[in-house]
Image (cartoon, grey):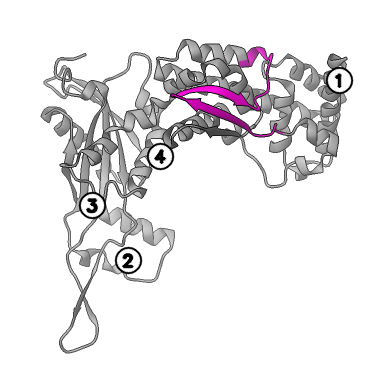
């Protein structure tokens, strides 16, 4: 690591918290703020005006002076362009911040308070009964920055941007930013725990689930709910979040009127998610997995082995999750495409069955997602071709059990 960062906390992830302040009187925005028009156009107009003239004041930072100044300048330039949305983080690369030889990657997120951008004075006017409007503009908005060195494998901050967005949102909703006290060890720890809460939960989860990884992968793919017993709140949240990331459910579109309600009882039971499983944690390790179904699926074992092998590499684990998740989605979409062709071409239905049997993901798991993601009203024959495919798989499973 570069000597400028060594021993100053940046190698583990530096932080900077800024107060976002506008430098104008409230009178310049009263035209849109005080009117009853709450349309999107009016709100965007107010937002654009509030970005015209602003400053970032340092509230807390662990960065070296030169890096903090470079970070703040880059953030100001980006904010000045008016292309930043509250709650959505951005990733910047800083090159040459220390005389040309310093490099860093910056994630920053503007977190805006929901309070109105002006306040009313409660002082009663002497010759009237109304109240005066305080002309001073105030804002409790903040910009949160996390800084690391460039990764040799991948841009980890870009990779974990959704998790970092969620972490910043939790800080705002919990009042951590609005009441942040630089002299409080608790406040500093809540901000500086960003890497542990947003990124390093992955290695911990893989280590804790080492003995149950194939079953956990299968449970996540098949939509099985995971409950946790014996762990603290953070451990429970991390394990459930990890299982959610294993599942492709959130990445697939689920229409309100899917084919599932149209299935008969036997077909619905065949593609139903297993009942919830309960994981028991003792001393940070999962020691029991009640309700987890054993699996002989090659893809589940291969996926599990890849994560266990990379259990100490946060970036590699994230990439494994994303790559395998994309593959499952590709298989689901391919089957749906073949089934769409099968509505007018019976040979395509045969191809769909062959493709389903050759997929790495278990056929029953793929059919679960197919049933939940095909809209019932797309075609009069969609239900018929899916029912035929489910029936074939039911017969194949029954034959294997004989």
- N-term mark: 2 or 4: 2
Secondary structure beneath dot 4 equals helix
- Figure label count: 4
Mark in front: 1 vs 2: 1
How far from the left and from the top, in percent, is residue 274? 70, 31
Rendered image quadrant of residue 99 = top left
Residue 126 position (above or below residue 209) = below
Report the Cα–Cα distance between label 3 and label 1. Answer: 68 Å
Report the Cα–Cα distance between label 2 and label 4. Answer: 30 Å
Q: Quadrant of the C terminus?
A: top right
Residue 277 position (above or below residue 98) = below
Secondary structure beneath dot 3 equals loop
Q: Which residues are magenta?
A: 273-300
Mark 1 Cα shell of 10 Å, populated few (<14), some (14-19), many (≥20)? few
Residue 275 position (above or below residue 95) = below
- N-term mark: 3 or 2: 2
How far from the left and from the top, in percent, is residue 134? 19, 70
Secondary structure beneath dot 1 equals helix
How far from the left and from the top, in percent, is residue 324? 56, 20
Which residue, given by chain and number where applicable, does mark 1 sit on?
A: 398
- N-term mark: 4 or 1: 4
Mark in front: 4 vs 1: 1
Rendered image quadrant of residue 10 = top left
Which residue, given by chain and number where applicable, does mark 3 sit on?
A: 52
- N-term mark: 3 or 4: 3
Give me the disc on residue 32.
Answer: 2
In this orientation, which residue lies closer to the viewer: 18 or 76?
18
Which residue, given by chain and number where applicable, does mark 4 sit on?
A: 166
Task: Check if mark 4's residue and mark 1's residue have beta carbons within 8 Å.
Answer: no
Residue sitting at x 79%, y 16% = 354
């Amino acid at each position: 690591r570069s000597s400028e960062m060594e021993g100053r906390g940046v190698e583990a992830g530096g932080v900077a918290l800024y107060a976002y302040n506008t430098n104008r009187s409230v009178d310049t925005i009263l035209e849109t703020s005080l009117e009853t028009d709450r349309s999107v156009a009016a709100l965007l107009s107010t937002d654009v005006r509030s970005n015209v003239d602003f400053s970032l004041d340092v509230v807390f930072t662990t960065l070296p002076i030169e890096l903090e100044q470079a970070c703040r300048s880059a953030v100001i330039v980006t904010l000045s362009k008016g292309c930043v949305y509250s709650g959505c983080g951005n990733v910047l690369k800083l090159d040459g911040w220390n005389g040309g030889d310093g490099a860093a990657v910056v994630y920053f997120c503007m977190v805006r308070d929901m309070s109105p951008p002006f306040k009313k004075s409660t002082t009663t006017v002497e010759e009237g009964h109304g109240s005066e409007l305080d002309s001073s503009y105030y804002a409790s908005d903040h910009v949160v920055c996390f800084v690391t060195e460039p990764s040799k494998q991948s841009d980890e901050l870009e990779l974990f941007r959704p998790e970092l967005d969620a972490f910043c949102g939790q800080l705002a909703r919990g009042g951590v930013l609005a009441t942040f006290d630089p002299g409080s060890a608790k406040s500093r720890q809540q901000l500086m725990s960003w890497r542990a809460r947003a990124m390093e939960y992955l290695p911990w989860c893989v280590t804790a689930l080492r003995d149950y990884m194939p079953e956990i992968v299968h449970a996540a793919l098949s939509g099985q709910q995971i409950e946790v017993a014996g762990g603290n709140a953070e451990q429970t949240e991390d394990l459930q979040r990890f299982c959610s990331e294993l599942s492709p459910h959130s990445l697939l579109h689920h229409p309100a009127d899917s084919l599932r309600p149209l299935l008969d009882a036997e077909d619905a039971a065949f593609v139903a998610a297993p009942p919830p499983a309960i994981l028991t944690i003792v001393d940070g390790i999962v020691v029991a997995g009640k309700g987890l179904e054993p699996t002989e699926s090659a893809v589940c074992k291969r996926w599990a082995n890849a994560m266990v092998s990379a259990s100490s590499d946060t970036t590699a684990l994230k990439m494994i999750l994303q790559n395998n998740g994309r593959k499952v989605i590709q298989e689901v979409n391919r089957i749906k495409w073949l089934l769409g062709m099968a509505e007018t071409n019976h040979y395509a239905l045969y191809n769909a069955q062959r493709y389903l049997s050759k997929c790495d993901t278990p056929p029953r798991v793929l059919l679960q997602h197919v049933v939940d993601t095909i809209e019932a009203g797309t075609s009069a024959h969609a239900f018929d071709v899916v029912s035929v495919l489910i029936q074939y798989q039911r017969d194949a499973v029954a034959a294997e059990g004989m």
